[in-house]
Image: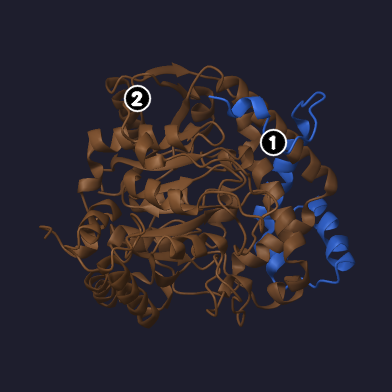
Chain colours: A brown, B blue
Amino acid sequence: MPDKPLYHLTIHEAQKLVRDRELSPVELTRAMLQRIEAVDGKLHAYLNLTAESAMNEARAAETEILHGQYKGPLHGIPLAVKDQLDLKSLPALIRGENARAGEDATAVQRLRSAGAVILGKLAMSSLPIEIPPPRNPWNTDRITGGSSTGPGAAVAAGLCMGALGEDTAGSIRNPASLCGIVGLKPTYGLVSRAGLAPLSWSLDHCGPMTWTVEDAAHVLQAIAGHDSKDPTSIDAPVPNYSAALKANIKDLVVGVPRDYIEECRARTDPEVLTLVEQAIAELKTLGARVVDVKLPALKLATIANAVIYYNEHFAAHKNDAKSTIKNAATSARARVYLGLLTSASDYIQAQRLRSRVRRECAEVFSKVDLLALPCQLKTAPTFAETGPLDTLYKHLLPEYQSPFNLAGLPAISIPCGFSKNKLPVALQLAGRPFDESTVLRSAYAYQQHAGWHEQRPPI
Amino acid sequence: MEKLTEQSLKPLLAQAGLEPKDGDLESFGDVLDTYVASLKALHAFDLADEEVAPTFNPAWTKT
């Protein structure tokens, strides 16, 4: 048995034990539920804990495995999902105060088909009502970052072994970077959006949030692939992501968009820049060739992303606008006004900028395999330092996450060290469309080399 | 809130049949003005004959 608490096992470690019948999914799920009971009162990561059905699923998984019906690395593994993804019969707060989901989101169905145990729904920001905000397990006076706030806190604190998040303007990578976990926003079209409450149809991406890169590969493997219920889903073969991790990165060329980093420098904490530069130097040590690249249109990518987001969001939620303005939380109300202020010509200009960004990226990716840059402007601020409109301001000025929603490219947040006040900092790696294998391979090589994942939050 | 932002927003609210919550336009003035200024920057960027092209170039995905 492992020399650490079961709730601190990675998916990869746990799946070997479960597969070899050295660890029962029942025992693992029970340990996770005990951990949630002990800690979540301080963190507020869960909105709906489905303890009873999770235990039933764990018992079913145990029986299947004992009968030789092992389904793969997620079989019997306790996971959770952001509120934005539907879980059959459970409240879907993002869809409205009294809304319930009729069926599971496709990504959730796929986790269940892979044998995962679903622990429940996790909190998020951008909800129509105010909820207690999840707290950062590295320092509970600090925020997790949003909008996948619950997944960030839960994965970092060992309240689930992995989670599904959603990313419209950095909402997987932002909490991943602030909470010291791995967050992967896949290529647009790789993971089905069916059963995902829309924030912005053309920018929403569902993806894994995990403790390690290896675990992200396992979760992505289960959820990736064509779904006829999502009109933007791509019908293409899904590679073996775990197998891709085994290769080294000596053949890779990593591009650093220095001009864009300069554009963001004034708003970026110098400690973040220093740690990210050190991580890029480590990629060189691992054999990658590092070159500077130019992407001039990126400086407007954040605002173009916001224009598309607010306009599509307003269109998707227009019928609720009256009650949102009357009753909803501050940022939700402000988003209605921003959507209203966006004209058709603004939206089209943003889409043209999107085309330009993609064209520039395509040109750069003919010479490099990856882009490397910071994943956050700052480490997690305290609640006292944070205002209700901060996220909206973040969406309006150049930052590091939104450009990859706009371009639809795969991008991963990977811990690359700690600030002087012991808060996580992350490197971001972005790749060609549908080349998650290279993104995961390089992130895995870095994580194994740097070893930051060996440190856990003090909670 | 700057006059121009307010002049733009009020008819849009009326057209959509919406009444702003008391105090919202004042408290959101700065973020709305920042947004309007950013929109101007977006339109000022020279995109030449760039089209709206919502799909990936198929050649791009070949690695």
N-terminal label among 2 and 1: 2
- Amino acid on which disc 1 is placed: Arg
Chain letter of disc 1? A
| Pick the front one: B45 or A164 | A164
Q: Foreground mark, 2 or 1?
A: 2
Q: Where A415 falls versus A262 (above or below)?
A: below
Where is residue A443, by image quadrant? top left
Q: Where A23 falls versus A341 (above or below)?
A: below
Where is residue A418, by image quadrant? top left
Q: Is residue A32 left or right of residue A92?
A: left
Residue occupied by mark 2: A249
Neighbours of disc 1 within 10 Å: few (<14), some (14-19), many (20+): many
Q: Are marks 2 and 1 in contact (CB under 8 Å)?
A: no
Which residue does the image show at 22% across and 59% down from the upper left?
A8
Q: Is residue A384 visible?
A: no
Q: Residue furthest front?
A: A67
Percent x, y for residue A377? 45, 42
- Amino acid on which disc 2 is placed: Ile
User: Which numbered disc covers residue B39?
Assistant: none
| Pick the front one: A331 or B63 | B63
User: Which numbered disc covers residue A354?
Assistant: 1
Q: Is residue B29 left or right of residue A212?
A: right
Percent x, y for residue A285? 27, 21
Percent x, y for residue A371? 48, 28
Q: Where B14 falls versus A206 (above or below)?
A: below
Quick check: do tags 2 and 1 share a chain? Answer: yes
Which residue does the image show at 59% across and 70% down from the upper left?
A94
Q: Secondary structure at mark 2?
A: loop
Percent x, y for residue A388? 54, 63
